[in-house]
Amino acid sequence: MTLSNALPLALYRSGQVRELDRVAIEEMGIPGICLMERAGAAAFNLLQQRWLKARRIIVVCGVGNNGGDGYVVARLAYLAGYDVTVLQLGDTTQLKGEALAAYEAMTDVGLFTQVFAEKKLSIVDLIVDALLGTGLDREVSGQWRQVIEAINRSKRPILSLDIPSGLHADTGTVLGVAIQATATMSFVGLKQGLFTGEGPAFTGQVYFNDLQIPAVAYKHVKSIVGRIEYDVVKTMFVRRSRIAHKGSYGHVLVIGGAPGMLGAVCMAAEAAARVGAGKVTVATHPSHAALVSLHRPEIMSYGVETTEALMPLVDQADVVAIGPGLGQSIWARALLDAVKDLQKPVVADADALNLMAQTPFRFPESVLTPHPGEAARLLEMSTVYIQSDRFHAVKSLQLRFGGVCVLKGAGTLIADEDGKISVCTNGNPGMATGGMGDVLTGVIVSLLGQGYTINEAARLGVCLHARAADKAAESGERGLLATDLFTWLRYYANPELF
Ligand SMILES: NC(=O)C1=CN([C@@H]2O[C@H](COP(=O)(O)OP(=O)(O)OC[C@H]3O[C@@H](n4cnc5c(N)ncnc54)[C@H](O)[C@@H]3O)[C@@H](O)[C@H]2O)[C@H](O)CC1
Ligand SMILES: [K+]
């Protein structure tokens, strides 16, 4: 069985995966125990190939089918000559169905479960986490919490089956505590919670196996969530015509930069230029307008005190970004009000979003790019609530404000007008620094100016931005600055180079 971690793009909720399970068993006649055997075999194959020197393994099993997968792994490893210890949590008299069958197949070969003991963890080469899978339905507490904490304390390599125990398959939130996996082998359908929220911090490297369920089964469930990454979306960059001119690639207007916050609008403007905008103009506070062109001569800059001064700039632009360093003053509110009905694509970020939260409205055609705090204000709820179900939050934003909504954070989510949600799997914690959002705004508005739709510009822009940040982070996540992305934005905006 060749090992591949080339992951499918479609992501599913646990209920959808259970439906796939049902279709396979009831409509395609694949016995449940057969699926479990295939799951165990796929996990054992990964174990053998990824941990070549491992000899002593511990399998920690719960009492559901995730535990059943664990019994299969344990039996296969035992029969292959590994030194296997199976530590049981919960009462095996609770076992039923496939899990009971797998348990009995294991005991039939002479391998029995033992009561969990932390001291047994320290002498093994690998721990297999078969405690909880998609059946996690409540906060992890009591002995389950203690065991997961002990496993994490062991600092041993951990292979989680289907999903790290304690991580919610649908939201990517940790219900109390979760296994810090080295690798996760997920079955049948990739769970959306593996790729956003806290998920990426707990999964380790994600592998997938479809358990040989026929593709036709997947027509029974409509995945509305899909993974996107730069290597998938880069084909959206098309080679430039040899007779192109400045006008071919759009005129971007970036509105922002209240006194003291010129940097934000400079970063957004330069990002727009670095991704290929034909022309970039900044409308900012008169007190520092001249500094923009000093900083980056290719960018035109005008001080605008009033909306009357702003509108000619808006009229000559193809697309507008508003928000970087805008502030929430009367001046800022006036500029936002001047473009709220604009019949051109608008990217709204930062304080434009905070002002929108105070007096909600919809742009005719927009990409909103809130971070969780701005999303909380827009939806009038807490940031904790936003992060507790990011998929629900980004969907709510899109339904309320229309257009495309980008919910930034680990596993940035993009909800588009067609009801689809995309999860960007590029990115790293080094991006949690000031200015990264301003740069993303510039990237997206640049792509809009180059003719991409709001759906396309948001997906391509988020992945390009995160891919550039991943490359820049190769010299260290700590100390990564937003302006470090410029070189790589230009590089990855030209995929024909590599
Ligand atoms: N279609 C597939 O993806 C396949 C899935 N398989 C494996 O089956 C599990 C799902 O099994 P299920 O029995 O539904 O749930 P779990 O094994 O995750 O556990 C449910 C079990 O745990 C109890 N429980 C829930 N939350 C907690 C908690 N916080 N603390 C303690 N106990 C908890 C609950 O009451 C149940 O008793 C899937 O993940 C795969 O690993 C198939 O084997 C292959 C096909
Ligand atoms: K698990």
Image (cartoon, grey):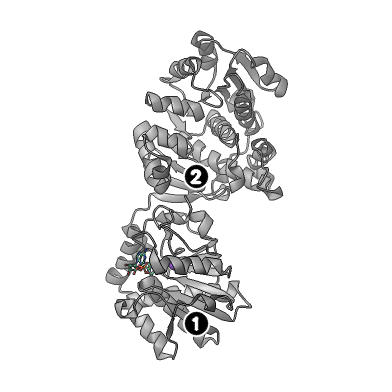
Tag 1: residue type?
Thr
* 348 is higher (above) or lower (below) than 126: above
Q: Residue at x 45, y 67 (%)?
A: 146
Q: Residue at x 41, y 61 (%)?
A: 189
**Secondary structure beneath label 1:** strand
Is residue 349 rendered to the left or right of residue 359? right
Q: Which dot marks residue 85?
A: 1
Tag 2: residue type?
Thr
Q: Looking at the rendering, which quadrant does residue 375 occupy?
A: top left
Q: Is mark 1 within 8 Å of ligand 2?
A: no
Q: Residue at x 44, y 91 (%)?
A: 110
Q: Looking at the rendering, which quadrant does residue 32 occupy?
A: bottom left
Q: Is 283 or 122 nearer to us in this picture?
A: 122
Within-10-Å neighbours for mark 1: few <14, some 14–19, many 20+: many
**Secondary structure beneath label 2:** loop
- Image coords of residue 196 (percent x, y): 47, 50
- Image coords of residue 238 (percent x, y): 59, 39
Is residue 448 rendered to the left or right of residue 384? right
Whether residue 359 is visible to the viewer of this picture, yes or no, is yes
* 342 is higher (above) or lower (below) than 165: above
Q: Quadrant of ligand 1?
A: bottom left
Q: CA distance from mark 2 to mark 1?
A: 39 Å
Q: Looking at the rendering, which quadrant does residue 366 occupy?
A: top left
Within-10-Å neighbours for mark 2: few <14, some 14–19, many 20+: many
Q: Is mark 2 within 8 Å of ligand 2?
A: no
Mark 1 or mark 2, which is nearer the start of the sequence?
Answer: 1
Mark toward the viewer: 2 or 1? 1
Q: How many marks?
A: 2
Residue under label 2, please give it: 412
